[in-house]
Amino acid sequence: MPYPHVFQPLDIGGCTLPNRIVRAAHSTGAVGEDLIAYHEARAKGGAALTILQIAGVHPSSPTDIPVFTDRVLPFYEQMAARLHAAGGKVFQQLWHGGAAIEQRSLQNFQQPLAPSAIPSPMVGVVPQALTQAMIDELVGAFATAARRCEQGGLDGVELHGAHGYLIGQFLSPATNLRDDDYGGSLENRARFLREILAAIRSETSPGFPVGIRISADDQIEGGVDPEEAAAIAKLVEPDIDFLDVSLSSYWRFHRLLSTLDEGLGYEVPTSEVVTKAVDVPTIVTGRITTLDHAEHLIRSGVADLVSIVRGMIADPELVAKARDGRESEVRPCIGTSVGCVARFMVAGKMRCVVNTAAGQETKVPFEPADRVAEPKRVLVAGGGPAGLEAARAAALRGHDVVLYEMTGELGGQVRMAASAPPRSDLGAITAFLADELDRLGVAVKLRSPVDPDVVAEEKPDELIIATGTTPRRGFQISAPSKPVSGADLPHVFTSWEVLGFGGRAAIGKRAVVYDDTGTFEAISVCDALMAAGAEVTFLSRHEQLGATIPYPAATVEASRERLFSGAFSFTPAAALREITPHAVIARDLGTYLERSFEADTVVIVSYHDCNSELADYLGSETEERSGAPRFNIHLAGDVNGTNSIMAAIHAGARVGREI
């Protein structure tokens, strides 16, 4: 069997797991049947253990799973029955946010509770320091919650002591300033946790697993580092059945759930300091997306279990496919956090950039299952993410599909984005889709633009136009009718030219980048310019870097840290006034004050033109000429004016599934 260590059973406190792949707790925004279906799909896909998202143990810190009341029991009974039938086990993560309470509590003007009056940076409300009576009440609440989990049929519980929540606030000397028995020494700071563990043992059966999740480094000045985290783990080891090690806190959010700016397995160097200090079963996480990586970590003794969360958001069948030797069919996570983390934080509902079904399992199948009775001839124009996804979905449904791409390679603008130094992982999704077209027998014609003659020759029943966009030169949204003066000078370039597509930019020593869109396009240009040795001045219409990217604390902050650590400066709320051979003249939005920036290289990143000429021509031809070919026209992706991989993939999937 491939991956012998991954597919070795493991006993945790009397609960036997069939393999070593775990899904650590993470919020989705789903509730009830939607939440059950989401986890059930991944248990069916081979995950041995699911740890359910935070469940608030006390009304002072409520969540979507109300574990502080018996109302939760029917939900637990259904969840346990469904996941057990799918072959998996299920634990509940028990939580109290402390100073980092959720927005629902803030909306009720409820003051947070914490070991000391230290606000969470993500909440900004000064909490009330817990009294002894309050501590005793919360200890009892954790114990009662654990009893409900066992009563509801779950297989175990995990205490959330990581990421700067209540237990972590007690453990960290940066947030615990108490001078009583719960503050000061490590033993005192761990007292709250040990009292909770003892109380849970008194309320649950001997064979009911109890573990804890801690941060190997809470990333706070004066806080817990890996050596102290290891000491905490060693101290509580007699009281736990397993240890789950994570990283960071709200003080440095992007390291808690990192994007592709971090390498695969980025948490391992700090986590293994902690996991190797104990003998109980251990779990590690942090951009681990393949069973090959998991096998290496288990074989080398880093941990006994490996958490794959985002990899199984992207493909719920990841474990089963790898087990069956079908790894090439695993839809890859590309690590942007835009669909999962960011969308949940902004909209309260998790989605996935590459998997249209994630979080919608009751409504959207992972793969299109309905094959058509009468296959159609489908012509796809454009080999970017939208065209590739549409072609794959249509082929899976049984249609006869041909895809034309005008360049020599598939991938579209994802290929350009992936060429930027830290963002190569983006290319994994278009590489996967291209391989899928080959597996499914889709005819692909490279260096083959689509014009009306090609359409007439192919005689499609359905035409999918996914021809994307092209950069505009000299356009900015603050003065849309007036081209930027000097934009036609030879040292002024588009993002495509800087990244080496459609011409190459001559990069000098002092570059000015103007960002009109607030997306990663301008950030990637800066990375490429700085990698070439240029000093970059970044002018933006927006107030912050990556302003239109959802939840910048999770998605953009790593880029901000990287850029500002180099030869980089940032000027917000700016518009371009004029470009001269040696400088950029910018004006402040609103005040119209002008500033001059020396530059021998200028890059304008603004909104693109939609390549919709083919659709416009064919649409008007069909209307005006009764003898025109009869076929349906569909537009997918950036050709519709969107500007993201997620929008392109989701649009392509929708079109391909609906034909």
Image: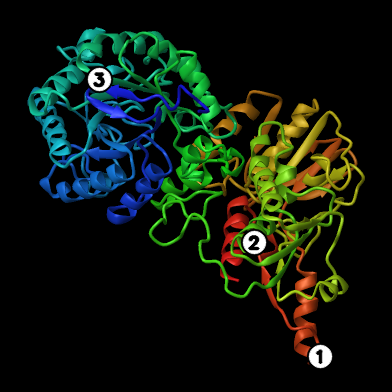
Which of these two is toward me, 514 or 339? 339
Which residue is identified by label 2?
395
State how the image is colored. Answer: rainbow
> Which numbered disc, 2 or 3, marks the residue that appears first in the sequence?
3
Q: Nearer the viewer, residue 580 or 198?
A: 198
The residues tagged by marks 2 and 3 sit, at their Cα atoms, a distance apart of: 48 Å
Q: Whole-Å distance between the Cαs marked 1 and 3?
A: 75 Å
Q: Does 94 sit left or right of 381 as displayed?
A: left
Residue, x 45% and y 60% (percent of image)? 364
- Residue 474 place in picture, x, y as percent: 81, 54
Q: Nearer the viewer, residue 279 or 158?
A: 279
* Amino acid type, residue under disc 2 in the picture: Ala
Q: Are marks 2 and 3 in contact (CB under 8 Å)?
A: no
In the structure shown, which secondary structural element does the residue marked by tag 3 occupy? Answer: loop
Earlier sequence position, callout 1 versus callout 2: 2
Q: Position of residue 344 (x, y in %)?
A: 42, 47
Q: Secondary structure at mark 2?
A: helix
Residue type at mark 1 is Gly
Q: Which residue is mark 1?
A: 627
What residue is drawn where x is 29% and y is 23%? 11
Task: Find residue 305 and report its image quarter.
Answer: top left
Q: Residue at point 29% right, 9% down? A: 234
Crowd around label 1: few <14 · some 14–19 · many ≥20 (10 Å): few
User: In this rendering, which labeled residue sits more in front, label 2 or label 3?
Assistant: 2
Q: Which residue is tagged 3?
A: 241
Measured in 3D between alpha carbons, the distance from the residue under mark 1 to the one under mark 2, in whole angstroms, is 29 Å
Image coords of residue 614 (percent x, y):
79, 71
In the image, residue 233 above or below residue 47: above
Left or right: where 237 falls relative to 362: left
Q: Residue 515: in sight, yes or no? A: yes
Q: Which mark is residue 568?
A: none
Residue at the (81%, 31%) spot, across then down: 510
